[in-house]
Amino acid sequence: MNAIEITQLKKSYGSVPIVKGIDLIVKRGEIFGFLGRNGAGKSTLINMLTGIIQPSSGTYSLLSVEGPNDQVKKRVGVMPDYSTLYGSLTAVEHLKFLSALSGNPATKVRCMEVLQLVGLESHAHKKAAKFSFGMKKKLGIAQAIVHNPELIFLDEPTSGLDAESAIHIHRLISQLQKEGKTIFMTSHNLDEVEKICTTIAIMKEGQIVKVGTMDELRAFYRSTITIKLKHSPIQKANQELLNEWLESFGTDVIMNDSYTTINIDEEKKIAEMIRAFNQCKVDILRVEVEEPTLEDIFLDDSLNERI
Amino acid sequence: MYVIGKREFFSLFKGIKSIIIVGMLLVTSYYSAKFSNFLASGMELTAKEAENIHTVGLLTLILIFGQLFVMGLSHDSLNRELHERTIRFLVTRTSRTSIIFGKFLGIWLFWFVCLTVSFLLISIFAQKIDVFIFSQTMSLLTYQIALTILLSVLIPKPGFTMFLGIVVGLAFPILGLWVNFTSNVWVSWTKFISPYYYLIREDYTFLVIVLLAGIMLITANLIFKRREC
């Protein structure tokens, strides 16, 4: 079952294209991370899906209901990227009003429960006008989940939050996923996306350049794996033999007394290397595998050209 | 729609502006009704006019300042939400039509309650409530509320609708009455879209005012549906 299906969704302002034809499927129960630089079109895409703006062309469906559809909104929670709250309402009043608007009015107990989940229970009766930026962000998340939606859009949920609050929100997002909800989030924090998202999409200049799990992105990004072995000293007699074998086995071999570095193309070759070293009576003390981080993938400008 | 209407209705009762306007409405109703006999004695009135003399103060207030009062309280009912982007919380949860009609319902109920209380005060002296005059007055307020909502959707800046509220509020009764009595053919046709043309008639044509309000609301809804939040 798919939570979101997007086909050739486009948005232009005059002759300037912002979103250039996106095709995307998000399965139910996923934490889908959406990465992109400022102005890449992430928020525009979320705004189109949630009814804030109208697409120029293309189709989409949320929870198997073709959009735009007002009925499905009751099953969706949205934390928009930039919104001020109603300054004259308290946190509890916000949650009561907005949950009632979604057709699932929350009791005071439920409101307090949600405020506790986002770490705002001690400010439940404070007016939003007196809230700090971080507190407003937390209330933004609370209003998105108070009516128990199946699909939740969070536009940069942890930007501007302190480290402790951000961890708190990460746990909450993971908890929501365990409850079977689908979370579609954007973020600038690469570590956060790498840590909590099950699937990641990278958007550049209005287009999705890559979608996949972290492992799939790594595999796509780098065709070779760099292995650094720490080992006991190699006997002179074996050193040449081993070096010759490694040259035929991988590339960029650097060998010295206690370290060997090599680039290989497959993970299973690591085991073969260890066996070869053991046969030469060399003990392997440590194996380090250098993998690309999400940061490496994200900053790789050639990603567009490689697709 | 009802949730938005309820919030709009209760939020209208908060604030000093509302207290002043409701106070003016009630004080005018009470004292104009109380002293209506003095007024009647100084003028030559038909039997029908004399019968309804108790409501004259309230009606004058609403005919002249009604648009100003409605715009003073609700000029930013939609554009404030658009400007501050709180509208995003609403459009992601319900239809845009529900938002427009919910806002209208809340404001309309506020004025309905104010007018009902005013007529009840008048009934202390008049010993009756004239449903016809009440309906005519309410139709005028309905028109003014719909116009206020239309302007609030058309003009994105709350600061500008506040200024426009004063201008429209003052010009509306002057121009509205002028187009009814002018012989200038270039402008006299506009009397058909002015509520005053239907109010001065002693029949049920005031229902056309409600129809005009409906057209303005539908227009506001169509514009709002195309608007980006």
Image (tube, rainbow, N blue to C red):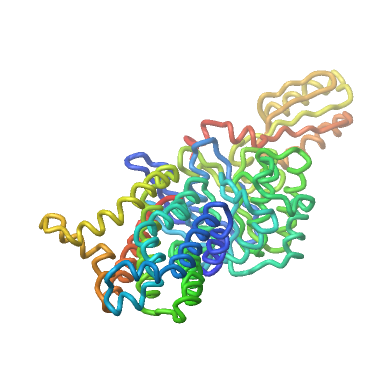
At 12% from the left and 55% from the top, the residue drawn is B186
At 47% from the left and 73% from the top, the residue drawn is B122
At 58% from the left and 31% from the top, the residue drawn is A299
- Quadrant for residue B184, please give it: bottom left
Residue A224 as seen in the image, left or right of residue A66? right
Do we see residue A66 in this rendering? Answer: no
Q: Position of residue A284 (x, y in %)?
A: 86, 32
Give the answer, above or below, for where A5 lies relative to A194: below
Number of marks: 0
Q: Position of residue B213 (x, y in %)?
A: 33, 66
Which residue is at the front of the view, B67 or A101?
Answer: B67
Do we see residue A110 in this rendering? Answer: yes
Q: Residue furthest bottom?
A: B128
Give the answer, above or below, for where A117 lies relative to A82: below
Residue B170 as seen in the image, left or right of residue A168? left
Which residue is at the front of the view, A218 or A299?
Answer: A299
Which residue is at the front of the view, A252 or A86?
Answer: A86
Q: Position of residue A239 (x, y in %)?
A: 81, 21
Give the answer, above or below, for where A211 lies relative to B149: above
Q: Position of residue A26 (x, y in %)?
A: 57, 57
Which residue is at the front of the view, B105 or A134?
Answer: B105
